[in-house]
Image: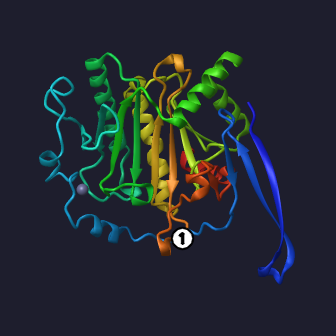
Amino acid sequence: MRFARIPRMTRFLDPRQNYAETTIESEIRLDPLTGFSGRIAHFGSGARPEVDVESLNQASLTHGCPFCPDLVEQVTPKFPPAIAADGRFRRGEALVFPNLSPYDAHSAVTVISRSHLMRPGDFAAKHWEDALAASVEYFGAVNRAEHHIGYGLIAGNYMPMAGASLLHPHLQIYATDRPGNWLQGQIDAARQYYQTEGRIFWQDLIVEEKSQGQRYLGATGAVEWLVPFVPLSFIGDIEAVFPHRYSILDLNAEDRHDFARGLAQVLRYMSENRLYSFNIGFYPGESEQDRTWVHTRISFRGSFNPALNSADISAIRQLYDEPFTIVYPEELAQELRPYFAG
Ligand SMILES: [Zn+2]
């Protein structure tokens, strides 16, 4: 397994130092599974100002919220009886119903909480545990009806900076035989790895990350946590790995509980570090044949220039598909590790 780092050095005459010659370091990294590249650059451009969550909240309530308890049962669709006898799936505060704007034939929304506004520190692990349980129950129902789900994808955009069009916390979940470019690339590479090495990539990754000790965070039960070598977000990603779980349907009650405990720790880190927004994505295989352990990425989101509401995705990411990150993953891991201790 190779963690390739390609250092780059830029020289220029620096106006901030009376035009003395200065050198700036950056780095290109290659993902150890896929070989996809990413850049670590632009250091120090990442001051994290406070976000006025209350004014977002006010704006979000101007036209009412379809996911709030007083409206959700009246304005969201119901599943046909073949999927859900009473139309929706419920667990604790979580509610699953069909997505009005589907991504695929089987496409749903999981509302996570009854409360409309949930700051990162407001979530209990139980919110996520229940949301995952209800989502997996939905995939199970699709599987019973269709005898097949393909890839059961669970994705989330938490807060507008992560692409959410509604503030109320929710997940997009869908079953598809087309897992998308990124996951397909991982699965192709994981199958190749298995053919060459005779082992599952993620098994080796965890052994290697534990032994290097630079990006490994810890475990919650059986779930392993680390900071990926090549992040997708400009302010860093976190990855959770579910050992020996291949399909989304393999995630049992204990797995969901263990994962939710770890995610609650990440959310605590966020609330203490002016991080307001993230994307979350589960990457399952279709079956053991994909040689892919279920893993999850949490990708922090923000703004390049909050005064202008600048998006954090510019041409390099949007058009060249090249992520860049302004913090070293190893430094992010150092900050996060205490949250996973004990
Ligand atoms: Zn709401």
Identify residue for label 1.
305
Tell me which image quadrant ligand 1 sits in. Answer: bottom left
Residue at 28%, 44% in the rendered image: 101
199 is higher (above) or lower (below) than 3: above
Residue at 48%, 42% in the rendered image: 262
171 left or right of 88? Answer: right
Q: Secondary structure at mark 1?
A: loop
Name the quadrant containing residue 15.
Answer: bottom right
177 left or right of 305? Answer: left
314 is higher (above) or lower (below) than 305: above
* Image quarter in which the C terminus is found: top right
Name the quadrant containing residue 91.
Answer: top left
Residue type marked 1: Asn
Q: Is mark 1 within 8 Å of ligand 1?
A: no
What is the x, y in percent for residue 156?
40, 46
Q: Which residue is outermost to the right?
A: 21
Residue at 40%, 37% in the rendered image: 154
Q: Which residue is outermost to the front?
A: 319
What is the x, y in percent for residue 198?
67, 15
* Image quarter in which the N terminus is found: top right
What is the x, y in percent for residue 284?
47, 29
What is the x, y in percent for residue 193?
67, 23
Counting other residues with Cα less than 10 Å from the Cα at mark 1, is it few (<14), some (14-19), or many (20 or more)?
Answer: some
- How many numbered circles are shown? 1
Residue at 55%, 45% in the rendered image: 238
